[in-house]
Image (tube, grey):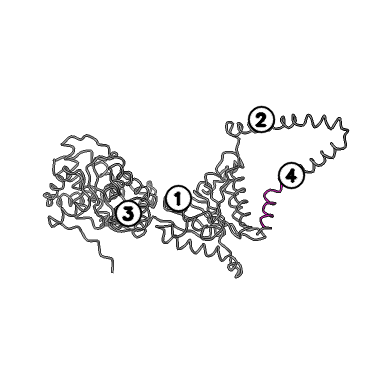
Amino acid sequence: MFWKRIKVMWWNHKIWFILGVIMVILVILSIMGLASLESFFQQQILGTLPLEIVKMIGYSILGAWAFVVLVYRVGMPMSGNSGSAVKSSDIKTTFNDVIGLTEAKREAMEVVHLIKDRAKVKKIGGKVIRGLLMVGPPGCGKTYLAKAIAHEAGVPFFSIAGSEFVEVFVGVGAGRVRKIFQKAKSAAYIHGAAILFIDELDAIGQSRKFSMFGSSESDNTLNQLLVNMDGLARDEGGNVIVIGATNAAEGVLDPALMRPGRFDRRIQITKPNLRDREEVFRYYLKKVKADPTMDIGRLARKAVAKSPAEVENIVKEAALISLRNERDMVTYKDIGDAMERVDLGLETHLELTPAERERVAYHESGHLVVLYRQHPTDDVFKASIKTRGGALGVVYHHPREELYTKTRDELFANVKTSLAGYVAEKIKYGNTSTGVGSDFENAMRLAHAMVWNFGMGSNGFVGDFTSIPENQISDDMKNRLNEEVQGILHKAAEEVETFLRSEWNTMDLFAKTLLERDELDYDEIEAIFKSHGRERLPLPAPPQ
C-alpha cells in the first residue's frame, strides 16, 4: 500500500518533483559559485539579495492578481473543480439509512458484493461491472444510494455533477473529464477499486448530433467520457466503477453510453410504495417532536406518489405550522395543512361575497359526494373552501392503495368527479360559473385519452390514434372520435345529475357544514356519511 501511494504520487506530481530537483541543483550551483568569488563580491551580492527577494515576491503578487482578473472578469476558462474525493470511512450513509427504496437497495447490494469479491470474479474469468446507471424521478434518493454503495463497498468515492463538465470554451469539458478520471484511477490503483458518481448525467450524456461543421463542445466532452469509460483499469490493477444518475427518459442518453461495457447495470429508482412511505414518514417524524398517537399508515395513504424529498419537506413545513400555532408537537392536522401548502400554495384569504362562498361550498360538495360514494378506488382526505393559490376551494383525494394501471371504470369515475362541481352549481342555481374551468380541462383531457389513446369508447374503435400523424386521419374519423369524447362527457354529466338530485339532502348538509367550518377532514366526512347510512364503494375485487 505504501509503495503504491508513492507510485501514484509520482504519476500525479512528477513534474513538480522534477522542478524541485532542478531548483535544488540550481541552489547548490549558486552556493558553489558564490563561494568561489572574492569576499568583496560576496558581500555585494549578499547585500542586494534581500532587495531581489522583495522584488520577486512583488512581481509574483502582481502576476497572481493579473491572472485572477483575467479569469474572473475576462472569462478565461479554468479546469479546476473537477470533482471531490471522499473516503469511504468519511461517508456515514449505510443501506440501513436508505429508506423507501426496497427494490433498488436489493440491486445495489448485489453491486456491492461484486465490488467486494472482485478478486474472485476475475479468478473465474468474469469482470467487475464498469458502470451502474440510476434512472428515476428527482428526490427519490439516487445520490443517497450511491453514497451507501461506496460506504458498504469500502472504496473511495468521487462525486461530480454533469453540469460541471459543461463549458463554452473548447476542450475545457474534456479536460475536466480526464482530470476526474485520473484521480479516480489513482485511488483505484491504491485501494483496488473506486467509485465515480456523476449526477445529472444527461447534462453531458445526451445523444450526439453529427454535423459537417464539426462537433460541439458538449459532444467532445461526451466523446472523452466514452473513451475514459473503456479500459478503466490500469495494467497494475484497480477498477473504476462509474455510477450515473439521471431523471431523463432512457431515449435521451447517447446509445454509445448505454451499450454493455460502459453502463452494465441499470437500477430503476421509483417513488416509494405504501410500505416504504410509512418508513419514510417514521424516519422524518423522529427528527421532530411529533404526536406519538399519529396514524403513520394513514399519512402514507394520504401521500400517494410523494417522493422521500417531498415527504421530508412536508414534515419540515408541518413543524413550522405547529410552531406558528404555538403547539408543542406536530399533529396530524399540521401534516394535512403542510400538504395543502406544498401542493396548492399559501392560503390567500380572499374576501369572497356570501353568494360566492356559498357557490364554492356547493361546488366542492358536489365533488366530495360523488367521489366518496361513486369512485371505485379514491378516498376523500379533505374538503376545503379556504382560498389557496388560484383555487377557491379543493377536495383533496388520492387512491386508497398503490395502483399502476387504471381501468375504464376508474377513468370514467374521474370524469364524473371532475364534472360533479359543475353539475352541483347547475342544480342549485340554474347556471354555472367560471370556477368550472379547471374541472372541464381535466374531464376533457381524460375523456379524450379514453377515446384517442386507450380504445375505451363505445363505437368499437381500437388503437392509439395519437400515434398516427394528424394529416393521415380523415376528417370523418376525427369527427367520429370527437363525438365519442362528447358522448362520454354527456353520459358522465347525466349520471352525476341523477345521482346528486337523489342525494341532495346530503349535498345541503355538506355545503352548510363547509360554510360553518371552512374545511372538513377525512374523519369528519366519514362520520357525516355514516350517520346518514351512506357508504363508499368497496375496492374492486381482484381478477380470478
Q: CA distance from mark 3 to mark 1?
A: 20 Å
Whether residue 450 is visible to the viewer of this picture, yes or no, is no
Q: Is residue 208 left or right of residue 299?
A: right
Residue situated in front as seen by the camera: 57 or 306: 57
The span picked out in magenta is 3-19
Tell me which label, 1 or 4, sits earlier in the chain: 4
Q: Residues within 10 Å of mark 2 (few under 14, many from 20)?
A: few
Label 2 SS: helix
User: Which amino acid type is marked by label 3?
Assistant: Val
Tell me which label, 3 or 4, sits earlier in the chain: 4
Residue identifier under label 1: 247
Magenta run includes residue 14: yes
Q: Which mark is residue 304?
A: 3
> Which is closer to the viewer, label 3 or label 2?
2
User: Which amino acid type is marked by label 2?
Assistant: Leu
> Which is closer to the viewer, label 2 or label 1?
2
User: Which amino acid type is marked by label 1?
Assistant: Asn
> Which quarter shows the C terminus?
bottom left
Tell me which label, 3 or 1, sits earlier in the chain: 1
Tell me which label, 2 or 1, sits earlier in the chain: 2
Residue identifier under label 4: 20
Q: CA distance from mark 1 to mark 4?
A: 47 Å
Q: Position of residue 530 (x, y in %)?
A: 15, 56
Q: Which mark is residue 62?
A: 2
